[in-house]
């Protein structure tokens, strides 16, 4: 039996499915460095996906050999994530091509097992016993037991381009009088391009990806590579022409070698202006964009609104603060309590349209309310939900809203926290605006927005007075209910805010 190679003994941890059917994740930061000792279930990295940041634990113990990826990169599920050298195994000699062997081992894993969550084991050797604990992190666990291995021999390596033209078995260098076979080099890889947008851009401009030298990691072809080729074409406008220069002196043919070597600034194809930056739409921003686009595309929404005199509610809270300064619910918590009571009377707004197994649409109603609270964070707008908000008092709602808002701002809210709501409440008044045509948080059926509370002239008992007034706006799915239901719900919440004492007495 031959001695296993270094790469075959290394443990390659592939990026697992972090839950919610995700196919990729953005690497936020590494918590370990190459050469560090790592234990089973020790967090090794932070990744962002589905609007949350989670720590990924290692399923192996040993020494970190290779970190596959850099912060800011988007990694596919099933791609090499972390390579660990088991305890007691000597480090490979510097001349050994360890990285190529590691990638070869990882490729074998993906070929044989699809998207596994464990590392490889040597070919023709007994399976490696994993030291995983079985702990679960959002849909996957560190392994316990035997890792999966190859079920068929690896295909033999083809001769490299340096070997083409050599006479087999003579050990001589290729002869000049013997032409090399007209074949493609066997070590040539397919173009590395994972973005459908980049592929379409290249196809629209008749650019072969095989001819593009990618500027990304490991030759990854990026959009800027395609844009550079488009700009470099003879028919593309050069900087001098765009600036207004023309004639022989301004032509590209007459430019000096130094001038032609300097790359022209990238121009926006639509406006002609210089492009300052191109940032991929990913992470939280892409999740938000996908959800909002789907909401507008699939939900026929309608909007109703009403101005509300909340002077009595503000006075009620101020009175509570004078008697008990600590633990007084905020205005939003009171409004949340009124919303939950309104949904009990108008449950259509707490339902959703879903597609059945046979492709038909159905109206899904649930027992209880998971109240989503829109929260603005440094990474974008997220909507953590208060589970079973219908069972909570105003004080309990206030505590839970504050807790979830803190988790959201710190990026620690789980995908489940951010995707389990049945109705959303959005307090955009904190931004100093009066109203908004809010977009429904798909796949929910309605969202209630509240503007800022401000002093406004208001008629009270036939007399003009200055009152605390806000605007409520309800956007709803017109498939689940009509205007009468939406108007009735909105009026119920408005009446509760105008007469909070009587409403709270009945709740």
Image: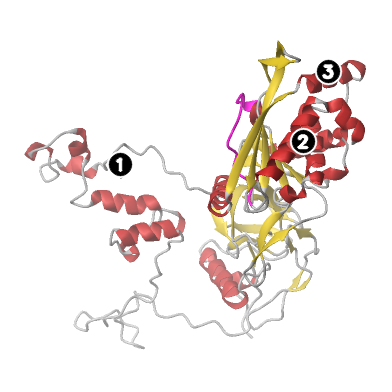
Distance CA(mark 2)–CA(mark 3) = 23 Å
Distance CA(mark 2)–CA(mark 1) = 54 Å
* Residue 492 numbered mark, or none: 2
* Residue 318 numbered mark, or none: 3
Q: Quadrant of residue 273?
A: top left
In this rendering, would 48 be left or right of 191?
Answer: right
Q: Quadrant of the C terminus?
A: top right
Distance CA(mark 3)–CA(mark 1) = 57 Å
Q: Position of residue 450 (x, y in %)?
A: 68, 31
10 w.r.t. 174: above or below: above
* Residue beneath disc 1: 267
Q: Position of residue 278 (x, y in %)?
A: 42, 43
Ranked by sequence position, the earlier of labels 2 and 1 is 1
- Contact between marks 3 and 1 (CB within 8 A): the answer is no
For the record, the magenta segment spans 430-442
How many discs mark residues in the rendered view?
3
Q: Position of residue 73 (x, y in %)?
A: 53, 51
- In percent of the image, x 86 and y 19: which residue is there? 321
Q: Residues within 10 Å of mark 2 (few under 14, many from 20)?
A: many
Ranked by sequence position, the earlier of labels 2 and 3 is 3
In this rendering, would 246 be left or right of 344?
Answer: left
Q: Quadrant of residue 61?
A: bottom right
Q: Residues within 10 Å of mark 1 (few under 14, many from 20)?
A: some
Q: Quadrant of the N terminus?
A: bottom right
Does dot 2 land on a helix, a strand or a loop?
Answer: helix
Q: Position of residue 460 (x, y in %)?
A: 74, 15
Does dot 1 land on a helix, a strand or a loop?
Answer: loop
- In percent of the image, x 16 and y 43: which residue is there? 257
Comparing 489 with 103, the one in front is 489
**Residue 377 is at least partly visible in this image:** no
């Amino acid at each position: 039996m031959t001695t296993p190679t270094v790469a075959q003994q290394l443990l390659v941890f592939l990026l697992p499915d972090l839950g919610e059917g995700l196919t990729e994740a953005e690497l936020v930061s590494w918590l370990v460095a190459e050469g560090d000792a790592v234990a089973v279930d020790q967090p090794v990295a932070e990744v962002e996906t589905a609007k949350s940041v989670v720590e990924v634990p290692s399923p192996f113990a040993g020494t970190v050999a290779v970190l596959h990826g850099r912060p800011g990169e988007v990694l596919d599920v099933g791609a090499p994530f972390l390579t660990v050298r088991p305890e007691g195994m000597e480090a490979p000699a510097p001349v050994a091509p360890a990285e190529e062997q590691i990638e070869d081992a990882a490729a074998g894993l993906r070929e044989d097992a699809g998207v596994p969550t464990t590392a490889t084991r040597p070919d023709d050797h007994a399976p490696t016993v994993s030291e995983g604990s079985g702990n679960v992190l959002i849909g996957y666990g560190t392994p316990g037991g035997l890792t999966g291995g190859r079920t068929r021999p690896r295909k033999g390596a083809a001769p490299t381009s340096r070997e083409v033209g050599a006479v087999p078995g003579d050990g001589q260098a290729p002869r000049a009088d013997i032409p090399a076979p007209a074949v493609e080099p066997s070590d040539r890889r397919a173009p590395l391009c994972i973005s459908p947008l980049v592929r379409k851009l290249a196809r629209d401009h008749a650019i072969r990806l095989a001819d593009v030298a990618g500027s990304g990691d490991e030759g990854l072809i990026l959009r800027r590579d395609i844009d550079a080729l488009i700009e470099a074409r003879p028919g593309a406008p050069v900087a001098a022409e765009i600036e207004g220069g023309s004639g022989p002196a301004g032509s590209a043919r007459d430019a000096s070698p130094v001038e032609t070597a300097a790359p022209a600034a990238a121009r926006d194809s639509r406006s002609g202006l210089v492009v300052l930056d191109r940032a991929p739409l990913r992470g939280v921003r892409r999740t938000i964009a996908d959800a909002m686009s789907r909401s507008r595309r699939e939900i026929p929404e309608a909007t109703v609104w009403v101005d509300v005199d909340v002077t009595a509610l503000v006075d009620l809270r101020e009175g509570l603060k004078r008697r008990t300064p600590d633990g007084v619910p905020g205005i939003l918590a009171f409004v949340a309590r009124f919303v939950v009571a309104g949904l009990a009377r108008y449950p259509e707004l707490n339902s959703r349209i879903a597609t059945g197994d046979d492709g038909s649409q159905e109206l899904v109603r649930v027992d209880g309310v998971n109240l989503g609270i829109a929260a603005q964070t440094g990474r974008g707008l997220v909507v953590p939900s208060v589970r079973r908000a219908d069972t909570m008092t105003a004080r309990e709602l206030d505590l839970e809203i504050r807790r979830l808002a803190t988790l959201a701002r710190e990026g620690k809210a789980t995908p489940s926290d951010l995707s389990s709501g049945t109705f959303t409440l959005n307090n955009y008044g904190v931004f100093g605006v009066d109203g908004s045509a809010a977009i429904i948080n798909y796949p929910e059926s309605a969202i209630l927005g509240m503007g800022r509370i401000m002093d406004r002239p208001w008629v009270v008992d036939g007399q003009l007075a200055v009152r605390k007034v806000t605007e409520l706006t309800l956007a709803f799915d017109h498939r689940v209910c009509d205007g009468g239901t939406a108007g009735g719900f909105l009026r119920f919440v408005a009446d509760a805010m105008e007469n909070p004492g009587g409403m709270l007495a009945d709740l």
